[in-house]
Amino acid sequence: MNVPWSSIANRAVRAVRKRLAPRAVILLYHRVAEVGSDPWSLCVTPDHFAEHLAVLRTYGHPMPLQQLVRAHREGRVPHRAVVVTFDDGYADNLHTAKPLLERYDIPATFFLTAGYVGQDREFWWDELDRLLLQPGTLPATLRLTIQGRSHTWNLNDEAAYSEAEYRRNRRRTASEGAPGSRHALYYAIWRLLQLLEDEARCSVLRDVAQWAGADAGPRTSHRVLSRDEAHALARGNHLEIGAHSVTHPFLSAQPIRMQREEIRQSKRSLEHMIERPISSFAYPFGDFMPETVSLIREAGFSCACTTLEETVWQPSDRLQWPRFEVRDWNGATFAGRLRAWLLR
């Protein structure tokens, strides 16, 4: 088939225009902290975070998320625009990240999980880490009934988990565990819990805690923001608060009625808590379906962030904005990644 030269030329022109068009990069962080085990690589050390902020000052044009919304709507996105966001609502966002952001004069948006703020509990994936991935001895066999189905796991030699093994594996990610390992057990249960509603999830975690003989409460190192701390975070210079649902569910696994409640209630609760309007949303786990996007629009949000790794272009849907997740890289590695993203 012969392709007309005019069609080839038009595609080439569009490609050049896309390459030269202003674009924005939205960065996704979770924590600025140093902890023992980190099965999801959520933590960036304070030293590395400071290096990241210095890089942003050198190579990027940092701006608040809502300012990017306005610029995108008007077709005036600045060259090398970069937005910093944080998901979940860990207390270190206030006590460690905020002072560094203010030192470098970098704006940021913090997406808070409304139902966890002010509660004396860890996020459910952290509670599972506390029960399964810490040194000590667990029973060799775990049996759970989840949504009417029976599940059995055998730890065998991994039932006894020494301090040396813990230190050796503490940077191992959740999905890297060999069959029969602590990490494999963690990941298997995490995948099942991810699809449950909060009440059912809590019930399973209570069963795991009873099996493990756990009596320790939530760890201060994994603490969620208190209500007063959330209010203090909202008062920061160029710092914005966004919603991240109520219970951090896998939204596409929930009925529409539940999705609507998670979205609307997170907005209402946070607005009451911080006494400011909430205009931004981040999908828990980056998960959504077309109906979820409609619910976000219906709730009155001006933008919503995913975990799809891509740059923001002028045609990008503001209710499905992509983000790049940042790992615990040093400044040089982060600079290389940022330059590549800005040119993507």
Image (tube, rainbow, N blue to C red):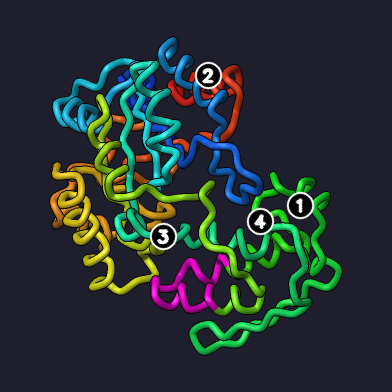
Q: Residue under label 2, please give it.
A: 51
Q: Nearer the viewer, mark 3 or mark 4?
A: 3
Task: Give SS at disc 4.
Answer: helix
Outermost residue toward the top?
58
Decide whether residue 192 is among the magenta residues.
yes
In the rendered structure, find residue 175 and report the number of the disc placed on it: 4
Which three-letter amino acid code belongs to the residue tagged 4?
Answer: Ser
Position of residue 286 relative to residue 340, above or below, is: below
- The disc, 1 or 2, on the residue closer to the chain's N-terminal end is 2
- Asked if residue 155 is positioned above or below residue 226 in the image, the reply reads below
Q: Of discs 2 and 4, which sits in the foreground?
A: 2
Q: Nearer the viewer, residue 61 or 266?
A: 266
| Residues under numbered marks 2 and 3 in contact, where contact means CB atoms less than 8 Å apart | no
Residue receiving disc 1: 166
Instruction: Please identify, in this view, whether the residue under mark 3 or under mark 1 is nearer the observer.
Output: 3
Q: Nearer the viewer, mark 1 or mark 4?
A: 1
Query: Which residue is drawn at the image coordinates 48% and 78% (left, top)?
Result: 203
Q: Are marks 3 and 1 in contact (CB under 8 Å)?
A: no
* Dot placed on the residue nearer the N-terminal end, 2 or 4: 2
Q: Amino acid at mark 3?
A: Asp
Inter-mark Cα distance, 3 to 1 = 26 Å
Precedes in sequence: disc 2 or disc 3: 2
Badge 4 crowding class, 10 Å Cα cut-off, few under 14, some 14 to 19, many 20 or more, is: some
Tell me the magenta residue range: 190-206
Residue 217 in the figure: left or right of residue 90: right
- Callout 2: few (<14), some (14-19), or many (20+) C-alpha neighbours within 10 Å? some
Give SS at disc 2.
Answer: helix
Whether residue 289 appears in magenta in the rendering, the answer is: no
Indicate which disc, 1 or 4, sits on the residue closer to the N terminus. Answer: 1
Nearer to us in this view, 27 or 45: 45
Q: Amino acid at mark 1?
A: Tyr
